[in-house]
Image (cartoon, helix red, strand yellow):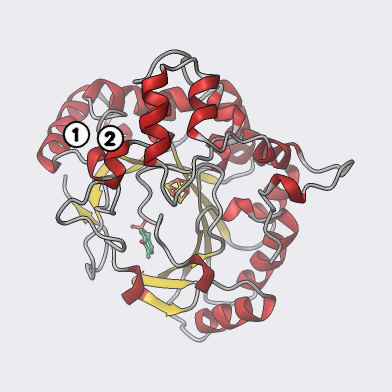
Amino acid sequence: MTILATNPTSVRPGSTSPQWQNELRQAVRTADELCRRLDLPELLTEAAADGAGEFPVFVPPSFLARMRPGDPDDPLLRQVLPMAAEADVVEGFSRDPVDDAAATMQPGVLQKYEGRVLLITTGACAVHCRYCFRRHYPYEEAPHSEAAWDRALASIAADASIREVILSGGDPLMLVDRTLTRLVEKIAAIPHVTRLRVHTRLPIMIPSRVTDELIAWLTGTRLTPVMVVHANHAQELSDEVASQLALLRERGVMLLNQAVLLRGVNDAAAAQIELSERLIEIGVMPYYLHQLDRVEGAAHFEVEAAEGRKIIATMRKRLPGYAVPRFVKEVPRALSKTVLV
Ligand SMILES: *Cc1c(COP(=O)(O)O)cnc(C)c1O
Ligand code: SF4
């Protein structure tokens, strides 16, 4: 597999790489720099630096540009700024809260639900979200060679009940298009698979990731293309994000959004309504609002499920039915996501 090197020392001088790869190389990688670029107070910088631990800061410049300078409560900043609270040990929060270990069929292949399998394509992401439930996932066990991928795909080919393959990660769009083209061709060669779904945050983080090559592999096989993006706040959905997503929609890609209910980011009905309205405006259906997975280090983001239900009730009053996401929770060993309301 060709995974983009995000290590700046490995950049070849004079190489002409796509814009999105340049943006990854320019990502902010320390709490210090993040706070400095946003003119934030020293006190916050110190707490943030302490919180980073083994999950370093990673924020691409195009996302940074959508944050409000000088505002420590900016909803985009909150998602990526480490906090001292990440080190707190809180009962009920664990390293693998969704029991991925039990659902692993083959290295890199997760199946929890009938008819759908999830391929863990890479551990890399274009951003490090502090609440991420896979922040402790053993990515080194995912397939790294063509042969390992062939073994993963063979297990899908051997099970005729599988109709949909979901590319996940990490973020599958961190792989270069050449690699993804080969992978998708192999998936399309499995006769019983009919849908290709991509779970990604990259078009939100770095809109230039929507390249002609990406559109070509996503729409160029007999598979029905579905993309599930991940935006938590309307402020993430800039005009550039909108115009890049429009390119996908014009080519017939079904666009859905999943968000996570996060304390201090989007835990108010007004914020959720604004998110849904903006999503519909740009042609993306609100799909899921997830109750936070109880991963170690993320307890300070948790919102009570009862509060989430109230938010949804308010949304239902004010929005058309299609603009209200399903509020769901991942329960280990359940046969689907569990709908809370
Ligand atoms: C969430 C998830 C899916 C997708 O579930 P849908 O309800 O179809 O969106 C598939 N596989 C795994 C392992 C998942 O965690
Ligand atoms: S983009 Fe998704 S997988 Fe990556 S850090 Fe954020 S929540 Fe986790």
Seen as rendered, the residue at the extreme left is 306
Q: Residues within 10 Å of mark 1 (few under 14, many from 20)?
A: many
Amino acid found under the numbered disc labelled 2: Val
Of 121 and 327, nearer the camera is 121
Amino acid found under the numbered disc labelled 1: Ile
Question: Residue 240: x and y, percent?
Answer: 61, 25
Q: Residue at x 13, y 40 (%)?
A: 304
Q: Which residue position is annotated with label 2?
A: 324
Q: Residue at x 74, y 36 (%)?
A: 19
Drawn side of residue 305 relative to residue 195, left or right: left
- Which of pointers 2 and 1 indicates the residue nearer the eye? 1
Drawn side of residue 65 relative to residue 274, left or right: right
Residue 139 lies, with reference to residue 217, above or below; the image says below
| Spatial separation of the CA atoms under disc 2 and disc 1 | 7 Å
Q: Residue at x 47, y 43 (%)?
A: 128
Q: Residue at x 61, y 27 (%)?
A: 243
Question: Residue 89: x and y, percent?
Answer: 21, 51
Is disc 2 placed on a helix, strand or loop? loop
Q: Residues within 10 Å of mark 2 (few under 14, many from 20)?
A: many
Question: Residue 165: x and y, percent?
Answer: 50, 66
**Image quarter for residue 162?**
bottom left
Whether the residues at callouts 2 and 1 have beta carbons within 8 Å, the answer is yes
Q: How many marks?
A: 2
User: Would you say residue 233 is visible in this rendering?
Assistant: no
Residue 165 lies, with reference to residue 15, above or below; the image says below
Q: Quadrant of ligand 1?
A: bottom left
**Image quarter for residue 275?**
top left
Q: Which mark is residue 312?
A: 1
Question: Residue 136: x and y, percent?
Answer: 39, 60
Quadrant including the C terminus: top left
User: Would you say residue 62 is visible in this rendering?
Assistant: yes
Is disc 1 placed on a helix, strand or loop? helix
